[in-house]
Amino acid sequence: MNSAGGGCLEDENWIEKVMEAGKILRTIKKELPLVVKPGVKLLEIAEFVESRTVELGAFPAFPCNISVNSDAAHFTPRRGDERVLEEGSVVKVDIGAHVDGYIADTAITFDFSSENQKLVEASEKALENAIATVKAGVDVHDIGKVIEETIKKYGLNPIYNLTGHGLKRWIAHTKPTIYNHPAGKGVKLEEGMCIAIEPFVTNGIGKVVDRNEVEIFSLPEKVVSNEKSHRLVRMRQAREVLIEAMKYRTLPFAKRWLKKAPEIAIAKLVKARLLRAYPVLAEVSGGLVAQTEHTLIVEKDSAVVVT
């Protein structure tokens, strides 16, 4: 099996490692209903997912994302966060695990309103229909078309500026980009690609924008590959943040994972482009959002569903 674009072949055992990460995520997803409940602290949910990932033999590929209602992505609680999951919420839990840098990524939506199940069903059905199209040679444009058509049948909209993606070793988002609408024509899936498809569905207009809350960061590849990057930083606190963050390589990490993360140090590193920030993404019109996601390995005539 070859690997290209979003493939992750650097190790002859890469499939086993991705599958092991996926198995761990499947176990955690089965356990989530015991934890994801109204009244539970968001921090408790995140810490459960992240510690359970380690207990089962992997490491988090990124901080547990718990995006509520019109938030679509990139929310993770801060250190000491007292916020709780409220009754009536639509909650996306997006989790990732890696084994030796080989990543699996999955997401599920909980509807505690009993009024928005159509959102969840549309996302799940769009993913199901998209997976049925996946095989080597399929154009991502056609996958996006299937996703959008499925969602529109429910009278809802895809989020047009959020996408699925390829997965590579130590890189959680890479080519190919898999849109939730017909776009990207000419980009074809190849045998051996490792990809994540994630339909986002909303009853809003279908666009997300940055919200002024950031708890997730990552190091650019150029920083990780340069062992002397920290020497470019004069502020001692910023240097310490950079050195500690190196253990996560290019994978996203939460500010709460660091021993110390002074705001001034983080801001300096982001401004110097030594640190990449991931603001919370919210639906611009305030629409509710649902998300469902699976990791797949592309084969000649179909795909292996990892998660």
Image (cartoon, rainbow, N blue to C red):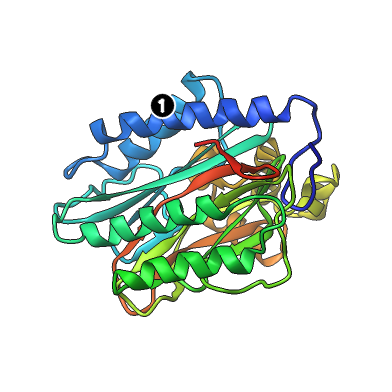
Specify the farthest residue to the front: 301
Q: Residue at x 50, y 27 (%)?
A: 23
How packed mark 1 is, by other alpha carbons closer than 10 Å (few <14, some 14-19, many 20 or more), is: some
Residue 125: % across, % down: 37, 55
- 104 horizontally vs 72: left or right: right
Q: Residue at x 41, y 51 (%)?
A: 292
Q: Residue at x 61, y 74 (%)?
A: 183
- 96 horizontally vs 187: left or right: left
**Residue 216 appears in the picture as rendered:** no
**Residue 272 appears in the picture as rendered:** yes
- Tell me where residue 97 sits by quadrant: top right
- Tell me where residue 227 sits by quadrant: top right
Does dot 1 land on a helix, a strand or a loop? helix
Q: How many marks?
A: 1
184 or 254, nearer to the observer: 184
- 139 horizontally vs 280: left or right: right
108 or 234, nearer to the observer: 108
Residue 172: % across, % down: 63, 48
Q: Is residue 10 above or below residue 223?
A: above
Q: Residue at x 59, y 67 (%)?
A: 142
Amino acid type indicated by mark 1: Thr
- Tell me where residue 179 sits by quadrant: bottom right
45 or 229, nearer to the observer: 45
Residue 199: % across, % down: 45, 60
Q: Quadrant of the N terminus?
A: top right
Residue 24: % across, % down: 49, 26
Q: Is residue 166 above or below residue 79?
A: below
Tell me the residue that label 1 is attached to.
27
